[in-house]
Amino acid sequence: MSRGVLTVVSGFSGAGKGTVMKGLLSKYGNYALSISATTRKPREGEQDGREYFFKTKEEFEKMIAEHAFIEYARYVENYYGTPGAYVEEQLAQGKDVLLEIEIQGALQVKKQRPDTLLVFITPPSAEILEQRLVGRGTETPEVIAMRMNRAVEEAAYMDAYDYIIVNDRLDDCIESMHQVIQSHHAASSQQDEFIRQMQKELEERKERKA
Ligand code: 5GP
């Protein structure tokens, strides 16, 4: 069985990443979503172990010391990190694993594993981004302002991503994501084992004929 594709999905806060991930998971059977740990307080309706593993700062720092994370970052005064064990296990089982993480984390993962696919989801315009953040109604005006400022910084890294997907119509966005990820199964970086096997078989045939 071939290994799954590891995809990192980033995008401005309010770009609709969470909804796109949910759409992929419910529409197709081969995806697994990694659940991050964070020191942020749960928002209304969020459950420990579903949206995040909610940790204290001390618990999180202990996990850092134990090398439990593939990557971690500070974002708007909180820690966020991806536990490595689940990701490894799912990839080995052939699942396409989705990480919904911000840019510092995305770049760390790509550096460690160059075969990672980096996808950036963005609303069609800055105005629509702000409207979506305000409309969500879960954040204070100060946090919205912080997130808009952060978006300015993040926009500088958009070209580090392999693909930019505009989230205008949700269904189109989900379809584009799925296509990009499925195409990546054919990338040579995903085919290491197959390439080695083919090379070995060809060498063996050559030796037999010689
Ligand atoms: P939120 O607080 O809105 O749930 O997430 C804030 C930001 O943290 C989002 O950009 C989200 O993608 C990012 N994030 C969530 N989990 C992780 C993680 O494990 N690592 C990193 N680096 N960023 C994360």
Image (cartoon, rainbow, N blue to C red):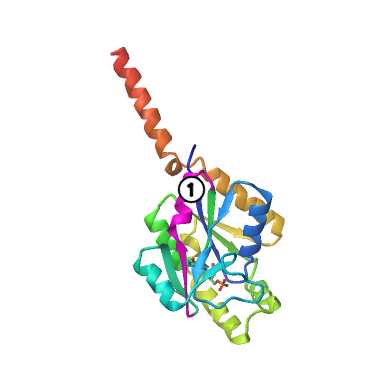
Q: Quadrant of residue 69?
A: bottom left
Q: Is residue 160 left or right of residue 146?
A: left
Residue ID at (59%, 66%):
51
160 in relation to 203, above or below: below
- Indicate yes or no whether the magenta region holds residue 81: yes
Question: The residue under label 1 is which amino acid type?
Answer: Leu
Span highlighted in magenta in the image? 77-95
Residue 186 locus on image (x, y percent)? 50, 40
- Indicate yes or no whether the magenta region holds residue 202: no
Say what secondary structure mark 1 lies in: helix
In this figure, what is the number of numbered marks? Answer: 1
139 in relation to 210, above or below: below
The residue wearing badge 1 is: 91
Question: Is disc 1 surrounded by few (<14), some (14 to 19) or many (20+) residues within 10 Å?
Answer: some
Residue ID at (45%, 43%):
190
**The C terminus, quarter of image:** top left
85 in relation to 152, above or below: above
Q: Is residue 144 left or right of residue 137?
A: left
Q: Compare residues 71 and 117 and report the one nearer the observer.
A: 71
Q: Compare residues 11 and 75 and report the one nearer the observer.
A: 75
Residue 52 locus on image (x, y percent)? 55, 67
Q: Compare residues 70 and 202 and report the one nearer the observer.
A: 70
